[in-house]
Amino acid sequence: MEAAAERATPRATRRRSRQLQGPGKRKAAAGDPPERARTRRRRQGPDRRMEKEQAEGVFREVVSYSPDPLPVRYYDTDTTSPVSFYLTSLEELLAWRPTMEDGFNVALEPPVGRQPPLSSSRPRTLVCHDMMGGYLDDRFIQGSSARQPYSFYHWQYIDIFVYFSHHMVTIPPVGWTNAAHKHGVCVLGTVITEWTDGAKLCEAFLAGDERSYRAVADQLVRLAQFFRFDGWLVNIENSLSTAAVGNTPGFLRYLTRELHRAVPGGLVLWYDSVVHSGQLKWQNELNDSNRIFFEACDGFFSNYNWREKHLERMVAQAGARRADVYVGVDIFARSDVVGGRFDTHKSLELIRKHGFSAALFAPGWVYECLEKNDFFQNQDRFWSLLERYLPTHSLCSLPFVTSFCLGLGTRRVCYGQEVDAGPWYHLSAQQPQPLLGEHGQEGGGEGWVKTRCCLAEAWNGGSSLLIRGAIPPEVGHVAVRLFSLQVPMPPKIFLSLVYKLEGPSAVTVALELSTGDTDSCHIGSISALNADTSRRYSAQPLRVPPTKLTRWASRCGQPLPGGWVQRCFKVMLQGCVLQDLFVSFSRPPNSHQEETFVCRLGEIQVVDAQSLLSPLPQVQTVTISHVRWQPAAPGSRGLTRSRQLQLSCTLHWAFPLPQACCFWVHCRREPVSGPQGGGPWDPKKPEFLGLAFTNQYRVVDLAVARDGPGQRGHVEFLVQPVPREGFPIPQAEWGRATLFYTSPDPDSH
């Protein structure tokens, strides 16, 4: 059934293809009778008109309730919403070729630059995400309405994220890849074989000649390159024949070499399972029985039942590649382990003592096994206990923009205004996350600052950063470091801070930065706060923005919805490296008592001024395809079923992806009977549909009006690009396409 569905061409696409290649494209043959030539010219007219209309973003449909099937691998069978997928057999792997549907699952960009690079000798931290079989709510590429979903946001503490499942080829859902890459974290899929079926599969591609295992490796490289993730964890948990185990190092070497060629920074890791004899025998260490596999790839992921004596022996085995040994820690603390759960720090202490990297397996334990209402508190507690053993990495590129969104929320907010009510979950929408926790003040003072994510209010997305603190009488201000950066600075940067103070408070909120390279770094227009080995500065407000920056600075100093305040700054630099971003809180003048405060941060932007001078391209060539119609579903809110249709379709458009952080997709539609739950229908106000992180979007079950037979309805789709610098684009510059449709007789279906 699946193969048949995949071969089927969706109705709207097939019909358009016939029209574009039909008689209208053929010239009259020499010697044709005049009446035949006139017939061809008459046929040619509608075809040319359709081409012209589609070039202008106009599409036409006659409503039909029997669409051709969509490829079931790529779409949820109930809603036709696009989903991430996996491969279950060698035949599926070797047969895979990229299709239009695969485009939904492609990551927006590679990992952003980071320091130190992953190739450094510093011990690393790997998270292996294994949760209830995988492909849960995270499989919905365009998000879902899940309540209390799992979220990971301590990215600055980790270097590698592995998406694990027990399917043969686990392709990471694109939401995880997008979220990780924004934080400079690389993402690996999993290749796993298990039990008797796994042994047969390995025999099929490893026991023959090199052409067999190279064909498999080539496909794995193509998958990583096309979907823009960063490599593979290879986990063979079944015995291998003599021939198969003999070819395994060659397979790993070839896979690693070809991946490095195709995917910059790509990684291949081997899991501690099979030994050189082919026997399945976990060693819990790197030793002479398994080092042949370690030498053939980028790293070794050990099993979990080790003791310190295993670590001591591995020091000599690993040699100069100690950071390439990832010592496994089962957070569920199953079997005989040093420490897991809230005692995981005991394992990490020993791992770091001997200079190894760590592989934390299934830290979703805090979600699976503890009270979900307390998830964020438990998640923060878990990672705070490990903080001393988890060196952070720094991000190295501009623009740096974050609204602190976790990729979920109880409602969706755009620049302080609610655009959609109800819970939502969309991992790709997660923004760069700060360092969280409780922070004492420099110099041993009694001031304190606590930070945590908060879903109660948001400026842009679904959450904000909640900061509580106290300024003691003996100090003038307190500050907290939010982000570790390592960015060579351009001559001029612009900064923006959106915040609001809760309740009556006279404290002053400011954005601060620290720089390295103090001997060569020249600062203009900024006053120094202290003279440290690195220097920290408070930026001067940007009072009169240059005309070309009006769009970016349009909200600076203006009253904003929801009580938010935006302050903008200009910084002139030369030869500097931006190291850290702080937010500071200063006591009001003439205050001599302790000042407490509660502040919400909604957004921080650090932008190269030069990037704001170049024009932003416009969305081009919005098309509509894969159309599906359905009668109104029972129980549709506030709508008369006999007067409603449900429309699903796929939008495509052209736009250079490196210049966008995402796309907001909207529609304008004719009113349907009954209230919409959001007040009177406004034909000029676009309705928010969803977010896209590639040049396509699937509209799912959109309610549209159904008029009488032969009457025409229409719906307009609008694509709003959001530039990487984070400012809103006027509607006049959005891409758009209009679908005109003719309703059938109500009884015809």
Image (cartoon, rainbow, N blue to C red):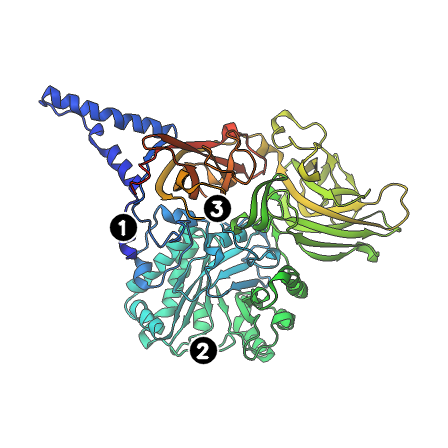
Work out whether residue 508 or residue 608 is closer to the camera in this orientation and state it.
508
| SS under mark 1 | helix
Instruction: Residue 521: give x, y in percent of width and height.
Output: 70, 41
Characterize the local packing of mark 3: few (<14), some (14-19) or many (20 or more) Cα atoms within 10 angstroms. Answer: many
Instruction: Residue 593: give x, y in percent of width and height.
Output: 89, 49
Instruction: Residue 398: give x, y in percent of width and height.
Output: 59, 42
> Do the residues bearing badges 2 and 1 touch, measured as CB atoms within 8 Å?
no
Q: Is residue 371 above or below residue 456?
A: below
Say which quadrant the C terminus sits in: top left
Instruction: Residue 527: give x, y in percent of width and height.
Output: 78, 38
Q: Which mark is residue 289?
A: 2
Characterize the local packing of mark 1: few (<14), some (14-19) or many (20 or more) Cα atoms within 10 angstroms. Answer: few
Give the label, 2 or 3, closer to the camera: 3
Q: Which mark is residue 108?
A: 3
Give the label, 1 or 3, closer to the camera: 1
Q: Earlier in the sequence, mark 2 or mark 3?
A: 3
Question: Left or right of 482: which side holds 262?
Answer: left
> Do the residues bearing badges 2 and 3 touch, measured as CB atoms within 8 Å?
no
| SS under mark 2 | loop
Quadrant assignment, res 307: bottom right
Q: Earlier in the sequence, mark 1 or mark 3?
A: 1
C-alpha gap between disc 2 and disc 3: 41 Å
Residue drawn at x 28%, y 57% as measured from the top left = 1
Q: Which mark is residue 7?
A: 1
Residue drawn at x 67%, y 42% as measured from the top left = 576
